[in-house]
């Protein structure tokens, strides 16, 4: 029997890898299809929820259904929440993972560890073929470090310390991260929703 397809409104290969790894880890039988269209200049909302909805709605309106999208931000309270919704383009229009991390580390030079408390937040927006929309949210709390640690260079992972394990997300194998991260928590809610509503949504 062919696995049901679900479109992921992203052109980010790292995200697709995380999504697929998570689904495989929990033996979820859905085929995740990367966005066949370029998703540019769609993250201009004022919240993660708005941005996730805009990306999912863009594909849904083009006939690619069902579809889901996520938007993630790293929030530092002592910096009034930045980089927040601007996390992926924090260092400018040509931002890279490296330049974003470098800018954030520069902003935290000399700041005490206690004030470096931060949290990742992920919001997933799912749009069913009927147009019915659902949101799922996950949060992971930790601290931003002044140096990079770990082999995994995705986003801010090498500078985000996860206290319960005493390591950065960049030091964690993907299978471990996919059990405790902000995205994993949001995906867990999403997957449970899909399992319990498969007959209706597909």
Image: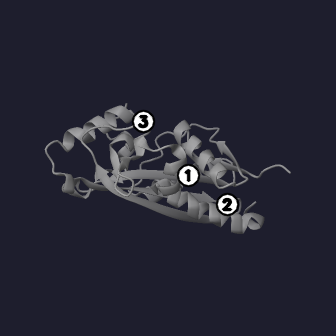
Q: CA distance from mark 1 to mark 2?
A: 12 Å
Residue for point 53% across, 63% down = 136
Q: Please say which color scheme the image uses.
A: one colour
Q: Earlier in the sequence, mark 3 or mark 2?
A: 2
Q: Earlier in the sequence, mark 1 or mark 2?
A: 1
Task: Using the image as rendered, state which of residue 173 and residue 31 is in the foreground.
Answer: 173
Task: Using the image as rendered, state which of residue 199 and residue 36 is in the foreground.
Answer: 199
Where is mark 3, residue-wise? 153
Residue for point 41% across, 49% down = 44
Callouts 3 and 1 close, C-beta under 8 Å:
no
- Where residue 98 appears, x then y in whole percent? 35, 32
* For residue 153, side relative to residue 127 (left or right): left
Observer able to see residue 12? no
Where is mark 2, residue-wise? 128
Q: Secondary structure at mark 2?
A: loop
Observer able to see residue 146? yes
Q: Secondary structure at mark 3?
A: loop
* For residue 133, side relative to residue 156 (left or right): right
Q: Earlier in the sequence, mark 3 or mark 1?
A: 1
- Where residue 125 appears, x then y in whole percent? 55, 58
Question: Label 2 neighbourhood size at 10 Å, few (<14), some (14-19), many (20+)?
Answer: some
- Where residue 189 appears, x then y in whole percent? 57, 64
Residue for point 39% across, 37% down = 150
Q: CA distance from mark 3 to mark 2?
A: 33 Å
Mark nearest the camera among 3 and 1 is 3
Mark nearest the camera among 3 and 2 is 3
Q: Is residue 67 above or below residue 194?
A: above
Q: CA distance from mark 3 to mark 1?
A: 22 Å
Question: Label 1 neighbourhood size at 10 Å, few (<14), some (14-19), many (20+)?
Answer: many
Where is mark 1, residue-wise? 69
User: Which quadrant of the rendered structure holds the C terminus?
Assistant: bottom right
Residue for point 41% across, 46% down = 169
């Amino acid at each position: 029997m062919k696995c049901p397809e679900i479109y992921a409104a992203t052109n980010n290969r790292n995200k697709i890898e995380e999504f697929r790894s998570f689904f495989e880890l929990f033996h979820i039988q859905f085929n995740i299809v990367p966005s066949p269209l370029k998703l540019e200049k769609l993250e201009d909302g004022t919240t993660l929820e708005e941005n996730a909805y805009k990306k999912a709605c863009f594909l849904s309106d083009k006939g690619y259904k069902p579809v889901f999208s996520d938007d993630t931000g790293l929030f530092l309270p002592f910096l009034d929440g930045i980089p927040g919704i601007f996390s992926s383009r924090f260092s400018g229009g040509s931002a890279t993972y490296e330049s974003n991390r470098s800018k954030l580390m520069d902003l935290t030079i000399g700041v005490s560890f206690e004030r470096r408390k931060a949290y990742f937040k992920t919001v997933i927006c799912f749009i069913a073929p009927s147009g019915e929309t659902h949101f799922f949210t996950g949060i992971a709390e930790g601290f931003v470090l002044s140096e990079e640690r770990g082999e995994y260079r995705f986003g801010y992972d090498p500078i985000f310390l996860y206290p319960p394990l005493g390591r950065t997300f960049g030091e964690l194998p993907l299978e471990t991260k996919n059990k405790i991260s902000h995205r994993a928590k949001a995906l867990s809610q999403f997957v449970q929703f899909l399992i319990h509503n498969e007959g209706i949504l597909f």
